[in-house]
Amino acid sequence: MTTQALLYALAVLLVIVGLVGVVLPALPGLPLVFAGMFIAAWAGGFQEIGWVTLVVLGLMTAVSFVVDFWATAHGAKRVGASKHAIWGAVLGTFAGLFIMPPLGLFVGPFVGALIGELIHGREIRKAAKVGFGTWLGIVLAIVLKLGLAFAMIGVFAFAWFF
């Protein structure tokens, strides 16, 4: 197998792992997608994919960080989440990922935010509302990042073939 073929295989692997990472918080999703695309461009000697396309893909990757923080914070703030709830959601996401994957990834943030609000002294009804709002923010972030990932794949494919 040639070096170029190995680089293309690595690029595909990084894009696939990156797509998984969009959903799993333990992996840097879109940076891995971008890394895979950069390696594919490099393997092709930047003939099919040029620097302009790579800059656009890099900017889309940067936007993903803003989207992630904005959507999560927006969901939490809309329901009046405390810092305890936000930290609880983060810890709950990781705990859920390891305790009962993949379902825990979706249950963990809600439970973590709920516990965080209860620690903050909120009543159960308000804590549940905050937990749900925080969870919705995380789901919104995942959906938006998936959209960005597939848009990046579209930009890459368009540049490669046209």
Image (cartoon, rainbow, N blue to C red):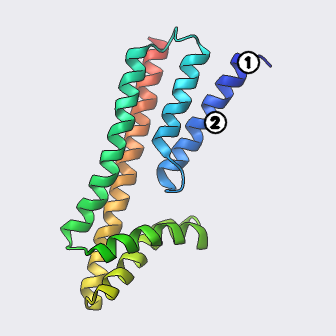
Which residue is drawn at the image coordinates 39% and 74% (left, top)? Answer: 88
The residue to which callout 1 is attached is 3
Specify the amino acid type for callout 2: Leu
Mark 2 neighbour density, 10 Å: few (under 14) some (14–19) many (20 or more): some
Classify residue 136 by image quadrant. bottom left
Q: Is residue 137 left or right of residue 95?
A: left
Q: Is residue 126 above or below residue 8?
A: below
Between residue 38 and residue 83, name the one nearer to us: 83
Tell me the CA gap for discs 1 and 2.
Answer: 15 Å
Which residue is drawn at the image coordinates 43% and 36% (left, top)? Answer: 150
Specify the amino acid type for callout 1: Thr
User: Residue 110 in the image: x percent, y percent?
Assistant: 39, 74
Q: Is residue 105 left or right of residue 99?
A: left
User: Regarding mark 1 in the picture, which secondary structure is present there?
Assistant: helix
User: Residue 115 in the image: x percent, y percent?
Assistant: 38, 83
Q: Is residue 131 visible?
A: no
Q: Is residue 126 left or right of residue 6?
A: left
Give the mark count.
Answer: 2
User: Residue 23 in the image: x percent, y percent?
Assistant: 48, 53
Between residue 103 and residue 43, name the one nearer to us: 43
**Badges 1 and 2: C-beta atoms under 8 Å apart?**
no
Q: Is residue 85 visible?
A: yes
Which residue is drawn at the image coordinates 61% and 31% (left, top)? Answer: 12
Which residue is drawn at the image coordinates 52% and 43% (left, top)? Answer: 19
Mark 1 neighbour density, 10 Å: few (under 14) some (14–19) many (20 or more): few
The residue to which callout 2 is attached is 13
Image quadrant in which the N terminus is located? top right
Q: Is residue 126 above or below residue 150?
A: below
Marks 1, 2: nearer the viewer: 1
